[in-house]
Amino acid sequence: MNHISEPPVERVTIPVLQRWKEEGRRIVMTTAYDAITARIADPVVDIILVGDSVGNVCLGFDNTLPVSVTMINDHLEAVVRTRRNALLVADMPFLSFHLNPAETIRNAGGFLQRGAEAVKLEGGAKRIEMVRALVDSEIPVMGHLGLTPQSVNVMGGFKVQGRKADAALHLLDDAHCLQEAGCFALVLEGIPAELAARATESLTIPTIGIGAGVGCSGQVLVFHDVVGLTQSRPKFARAYAEGFRTLQDALSRWVQDVRNGAFPTSQESFRLPDDLFDAITTWAPPNPT
Ligand code: KIV
């Protein structure tokens, strides 16, 4: 008997995303940092990002700056083991694409060798040499403009960008510069909705917004924000579950059951065969020497 009821899901690739932009089909991306979150996300989203947000979301850092290539490699390898259909993008952490093209290619190439299908990096015209080097090495690049968290010290905090005329026009120039250099998509983060919409309509590649309004080609949110596992969330995030409270409540009920002897029951225990049971009850501890 054939138990397969679902039609085969289309593997999300870069040409598929381009087609969806042309068809006006919205693209959905979320983060995953381990095998279980990738297993949950993979059947329902289009793109999985092994984001450097792992630093603040999972590793307890205040921002993404301490995240290293080794850390992304470890989380990427876990995600690769369970991801099936979504396009898999690895984030280039701080300092992994700033020094020179050779090192940038080596770091990004390592992500692709581990199973990522593209990389994402923050910055516009300043990073164009690195973007070109990656694209020339057959490494697909997703750009990231606006409130770029790796620039937290330059921005003086996590602040909405592109609110002044020169900054808004600069962002539009950067977006086209990245498209020219061969980026296949752009994340637009923390910018006014009108600016993101203008960028989206003027570009041929898709834009994925986060705190950038509804006029982008798609949206991205951090997985832990969507399921309510984070306790403080940015204004632009929406939690669709009370993950933190639900999980802590489940854990508390188990703790209570352990403490009052209600866990485990015979259902959660293993039994000895009767003859062995007799053997252990007649056994006496050896005399101490
Ligand atoms: O690291 C990350 O999670 C990101 C997304 C929020 C775009 O860069």
Image (tube, grey):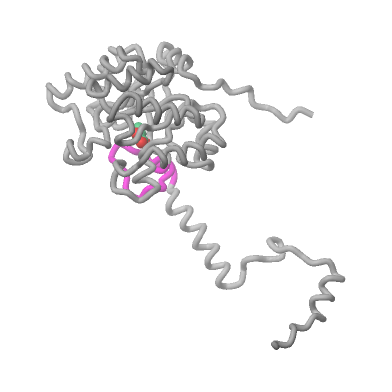
Q: Does residue 115 appear left or right of residue 225 in this picture?
A: right
**On screen, 215 above or below 204?**
below
Q: Please give the name of the residue rendered at 32% of the width and 24% of the height, measured from the top-left corner.
A: 101
For the stretch drawn in magenta, what is the main secondary structure?
loop
Residue 214 visible in the picture: no
Q: Quadrant of the C terminus?
A: bottom right
Nearest to the observer: residue 64 or residue 2: 64
- Residue 223 part of the magenta-drawn span: no
Residue 109 placement: quadrant: top left
In this picture, which residue range is highlighted in magenta? 224-241
Nearest to the observer: residue 172 or residue 192: 172
Residue 275 lies, in percent from the top left, at 87, 71
Q: Please give the name of the residue rendered at 31% of the width and 44% of the height, measured from the top-left corner.
A: 66
Residue 120 lies, in percent from the top left, at 37, 27
Q: Please give the name of the residue rendered at 29% of the width and 48% of the height, measured from the top-left corner.
A: 62
Q: Quadrant of the N terminus?
A: top right
Which of the four quarters of the rendered structure image does ligand 1 lie in? top left
Residue 273 placement: quadrant: bottom right
- Residue 232 part of the magenta-drawn span: yes
Q: Please give the name of the residue rendered at 29% of the width and 32% of the height, measured from the top-left corner.
A: 211
